[in-house]
Amino acid sequence: MKFSHIICLSLPLLAASCSDPSFSIKGEIEGGEGKTVVLEKADNSGRWVAIDSTSLKAGGKFSFSPHAPMAPDIYRLDLEGRYVYFPVDSIDKLTLTASAANFSHDFTLSGSENAETLARFEKELLTSTAKLSVADSAKAFKRHIFTEYLLNARGSVVSYYILTKTVDGRPLFTPAEDAPYFAAVATSFREFRPNDPRCALLENTATEGMRRRAGQRGQRHVMEADEIGFFPISLPDESGKNVALSDIAGHGVPTLLVFSDFSDPEAMALNSRLKKLYESGKVKIYQVGVDADRLTWRNAASNLPWTTVFATVSEVNDICAKYMVTSLPTVFVIDARGDISARPGNLDEINSLL
């Protein structure tokens, strides 16, 4: 099975002088003596172009030391039409050991955490291709990939690479089907790399994907239980009874998933506006309190007519990481089918999204 990758960002071509810093990648390709290995990088149009090449020496040894990119980027080594991709942050010093006979499959990449993560992803993908041909397995596999490689990536170029990976010419993640994943990675870029051009691209892709999902609703009539497009949450309400998000969302009425701090000075105004939305009958509400003080939360939550639950510190860290919640309050719109359809920037946007 052939794997490829399309980088569709328009990044400026970088002119560099001989005094500019360099990164390096070197290593050995067993059985490759005399063959030519080419170092490639994507141009402005996403086409891979050669930037250097070398003939493998005795033992398959090689080395490249090109100018370091001004922003993290993905490069690849091409050995007779087979590729090993690797990330470069700045002046990384990477080492590759591989087999010429099985270049894209049999390799070890070291020198940076991102490089090792990318190599691990590539190898896992190679052993999991059968899962991509079955809808339910593909969905579960993508959730695993998100949790394992994207959730805590902190806006790394590897997360962008994985999100835009293609297998046999087909994208692993598609904007219409996987808009929440694009939105989550976009949020990570917005927090950790706001000036990276990938940030705006991811945000635009996520927005367009959510629009497409909304347009497809009328064509999809059956929702399997494991197709619910949100990460599970099950937390105690003010009476101490655990209530799952799936108990509320995905049952024919849109739901607002709200993360908020009930002790915040603006909490009363937020809940007042949420109450108007709730009383309109247009939405259900599942509100997660992330307060430091459970008693403060309980006193405020007990007066609200919708579902309110409380998360401990460890639960907050886990849940907010999965949903990429970096500020409070944060609201998600979960549509009537149970898919996250939007992450509005403020409450004024919600009515237009319902």
Image: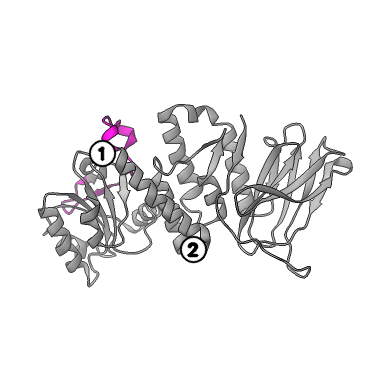
The x and y percentages for residue 332 are 29, 53
Is residue 312 within the magenta segment?
A: no
| Image-based side of 30 in relation to 229, left or right | right
Which residue in the structure is indicated by mark 2? 192
Quickly name the residue at label 1. Answer: 337
> Hey, which quadrant is residue 32 in on the image?
top right
> Which residue is located at x 25 percent, y 59 percent?
349
From the viewer's perspective, is the residue at label 1 or at label 2 nearer?
1
Q: Is residue 300 above or below residue 280?
A: below
Front-most of residues 217 and 239:
217
What residue is at 57 percent from the left and 48 percent from the top?
A: 7
Looking at numbered disc 1 in the image, what kind of residue is underneath it?
Arg
Label 1, residues with CA under 10 Å away: few <14, some 14-19, many ≥20: many
Inspect the magenta stretch and tell me whether residue 219 lies in it: yes
- Which image quarter: residue 119? top right
Depicted 60 relative to depicted 239: above or below: above
